[in-house]
Image: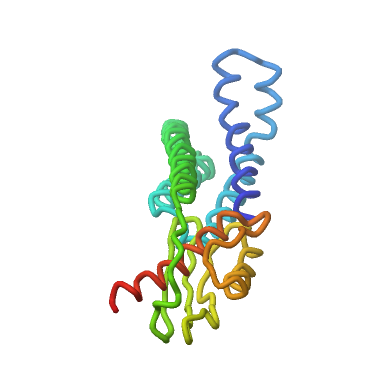
Amino acid sequence: MTFIFSIISLAVLLVVLSKFITKHLHLDKADKVLGKIHCKLGYLLVISATIHMLFSFYVFNSRPVYLYLLGILMLVCILLTAISYWCRKSLKKNWLIIHRLAALILCLLLLSHVGMYFYSVISYQRNVSSIEITEIDVGKTPDGTYIGECDVKYIYAKVNVTVSNGKITSINLLEHRNEKGAAAESIVNDVIENQKIDVDTISGATNSSKVIKKAIENALADCQKTT
């Protein structure tokens, strides 16, 4: 839902901002059409942007904080443009200055927001691709239950690994923040069955599979470091 409303908000915003272009390029027909729907699109933008912001908090822990700061500032600018229009009679000539200034700042924030988002995605993909699984000799691991985790921002896994008589007897997935990789959770069964960490990833959930496997490795590796 977050992605859907982000696309809606972006599309509406671009159409709303295009009114400024058609006016200054003297594209009279296009400007007239946009003028008729400009106000309604403004209301739609306020609604869609607010919904996008609310839904985005469901993945707050897996997103960089700066994306939320930029998003909040964008929403403030959107509301300011709307309020300046609603109060145009009391603001008189000043309303258009406030309206356009808020729209200009909104454009700059939008570019920053989109740019930072793609930067965070690239960084996340780089982190996932750099994950290398190292096999742990479970036979040398003392009996006990160990906790490990792996965090690449967009995906996070925390596991509870139990070892008994030199074998992995159970793996509990304590936490798994994922995009569309819930299917990867079954990989813990493959690790137990094969008694090795580097099993095949789950089709369609490769990134989550790698993160979960790394969390298992970290649990056993940290245990052996302290023994």
Q: Quick one: 69 or 185, which is closer to the camera?
A: 185
Q: Residue at x 62, y 74 (%)?
A: 193
Query: Above or below — where is 83 with respect to 95?
Result: below
Q: Residue at x 45, y 45 (%)?
A: 126
Instruction: Using residue 193 as the reference point, say whether residue 68 is left or right of it.
Output: left
Q: Quadrant of the C terminus?
A: bottom left
Residue 103 on image: x %, y %: 47, 34
Q: Quick one: 214 or 30, which is closer to the camera?
A: 214
Q: Give the residue furthest to the left.
A: 226
Query: Above or below — where is 107 with respect to 216?
Result: above
Q: Residue at x 64, y 40 (%)?
A: 41
Query: Above or below — where is 197 with respect to 206?
Result: below
Residue 134 on image: x %, y %: 44, 60
Q: Quadrant of the N terminus?
A: bottom right
Q: Quick one: 193 or 12, which is closer to the camera?
A: 193
How many marks are shown on the rendered structure? 0
Q: Give the residue furthest to the front.
A: 139
Residue 130 can be seen, yes or no: yes
Instruction: Using residue 193 as the reference point, say whether residue 171 is left or right of it.
Output: left
Looking at the picture, the colour scheme in use is rainbow
Residue 169 on image: x %, y %: 54, 83
Residue 91 can be seen, yes or no: no
Instruction: Using residue 141 as the reference point, say whether residue 226 is left or right of it.
Output: left
Residue 216 on image: x %, y %: 47, 69
Query: Above or below — where is 193 with respect to 75?
Result: below
Q: Residue at x 44, y 48 (%)?
A: 130
Q: Quick one: 199 or 50, which is closer to the camera?
A: 199
